[in-house]
Image (cartoon, helix red, strand yellow):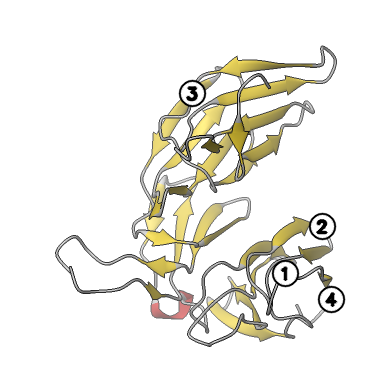
Amino acid sequence: MNYLIFFPLFLSVSAEGKVYAMGGMGCDTAPQALVRVYEAAKDRWQPLTAMPTPRYGATPFIRGNKIFLMGGRQGKMPVTALEAFDLETKSWTRYPCIPTRRAFSCCAANEQSLFSIGGLQQPGPHNFYSRPHFVSTMEEYDLDQGIWIKPSRTSRMKEKRADFVAGWLGGRIIAAGGLGNEPAPLGSVESYNAVKQRWECVAPMPTARCSSALLQTSSMLLVIGGVAQGPSNAVEALCLSDTV
């Protein structure tokens, strides 16, 4: 790429094996809207239509011929935008925004829905003396109906957390680690049972931590690195079993 972009940049790989680089932070720390695609056969990056909302730290999901981008940040402020890039028309479409403004939330997806989970709730514009606080919120966007489903009391996580990892494993949403109302990073793990519409406890991580990376396969979630009492080099996996 012939431009300077710093972490966190988000990448997504399409079914054709092309790598899409979207957004990130520029050398002036400003959020970026640039989009580039890497074609291995030609060994080159090509510019594409820029994102409607500049941001970094967003979560990409590929569904059909579209790359959906959820959330992210602009400096210290969370972004609520949900937008999709059409891989055929090379154009962007805006969708209804995430209902609540939360920083350091996590996103997960299944075939029917996109989920925005947890984070630090930002105070409203008139609450000058309020502080951000950890929440257990989960909000679901139904891809078929094109709407955000009103959350229920049972859709809240058991534990309030932010800066954690989340994925989809064995038909359930998994939320692991992060920061909460404890003085140290969390090691707790929970899963959302969509049939029972409730969160259930899972065996905790061996290493409590936040700010980790997540690598997902069809049978396991790998939690990589992060911060415990200091930088952590732990790599641990939650594997699919009858109890997950």
Which is more toward the observer, 65 or 33?
33
Residue 166 is drawn in which quadrant?
bottom right
Mark 3, residues whose alpha carbon is within 10 Å: few (<14), some, or many (≥20)? some
Task: Determine the CA span between mark 3 and mark 1.
Answer: 35 Å
Residue at 53%, 34% in the rendered image: 27
Residue 239 seen in this snapshot: no
- For label 2, the residue is 218
Which residue lies under the disc numbered 3? 50
Horizontally, residue 44 falls left or right of residue 110, namely right
The amino acid beneath tag 4 is Ser
- Residue at 82 percent across and 71 percent down: it is 234
In three-dimensional space, the C-alpha distance between marks 4 and 1, rounded to whole angstroms, equals: 30 Å
- Cα distance in 3D space between marks 4 and 2: 12 Å
Residue 231: image tag? 1
Counting residues from the start of the chain, the first of labels 4 and 3 encountered is 3
Q: Secondary structure at mark 2?
A: loop
User: Which is in the foreground here, disc 4 or disc 1?
Assistant: 1
Residue 224 at x, y percent in the picture: 77, 63
C-beta proximity under 8 Å, tags 4 and 2: no
Specify whether residue 13 is in view.
yes
Sooner in the amino-acid sequence: mark 4 or mark 1: 1
